[in-house]
Image (cartoon, helix red, strand yellow):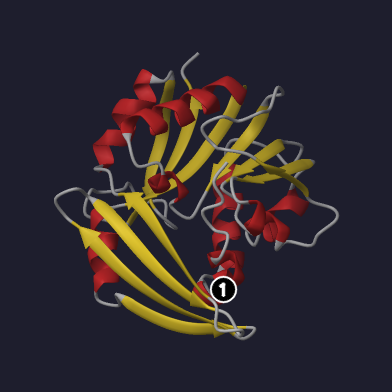
Amino acid sequence: MKDNYKYVSDIYDQLMEKVDYKFWAKYLKRLSSLYVGNNSIVLEVAAGNCNLAKYLSDSFRFYVASDISISMLKKNKSQNLQKVCCDMTMLPFKNKFDLIICAFDSINYLTNRKSVTRFFLEINNILSEQGIFLFDAALERNSYKHQKHAVKKGKQKGVLFNRQSLYLHKSRIHKNIFEIIYPDGNKMKEIHRQKIYPLEFYFELLDKCGLYAVECFNAFTFRNCKSNDLRAQFVVKRKY
């Protein structure tokens, strides 16, 4: 598996300094409580360095945090949190989960229809009969918003970084280009790509994969999502 966050993991906390993980976790907990209880078995995919899991894991009986980047998972030093390095389109789990979470527009990192289909089929395979799948997706307006702050510079524990954000409207690809400079002068570059799908894309593909959206909210609210919102929050169940 390719570790796409090998170097960005070293500056990730500074990069995400404005993200209120506690607030995000509270919203997801409130949302999930409408469908499942505290006795649930939970899987978080694309959990990164587990900053969200830190606020969610204690609320449930069993919580697994997974991510494709071993570098990101290793940043979390908790001995009480179960962590698994795996590809979200090839999940290794045999048991069923009552709640599956995919946050921070991680689904947008699946940049083609085939990979999103594989992911949804994996979810269908491991989601319990009455379970729910929560995921959020960045929409096009969000990409245009980030163009207003296209360049970000920062420093974390002596590691400098420059990030350039670029949205390519024609291909609907949002690129984040990172230059990371270590104290010894060593420079590394990572390019992260996200596909900004239209809102209706998710409804269509969920249906084809045996899933359906119970709700689709404007993220962090309980208002129905519109295509011109920044981010969509889906609540998904199995059709059968």
Residue 19, percent from left and from top: 51, 70
Q: Quadrant of residue 228?
A: bottom left
Describe residue 152's horizontal placement relative to residue 131 as left or right.
Answer: left
Q: Which residue is at 70% across, 22% downward?
A: 94
Describe residue 106's horizontal placement relative to residue 90 as left or right.
Answer: left
Say which quadrant the N terminus sits in.
top right
Q: Which residue is at 47% across, 31% downward?
A: 119
Residue 155, percent from left and from top: 54, 84
Residue 79, percent from left and from top: 85, 55
Question: What's the amino acid at mark 1?
Answer: Ile
In the orientation shown, which residue stands out farthest toward the right? 79
Confirm whether residue 145 shows in the render: yes
Confirm whether residue 18 shows in the render: no
Q: Nearer the viewer, residue 157 or 130?
A: 157
Q: Quadrant of residue 211?
A: top left
Q: Nearer the viewer, residue 111 or 58?
A: 111
The residue pinned by badge 1 equals 11
Describe residue 13's horizontal placement relative to residue 199 as left or right.
Answer: right
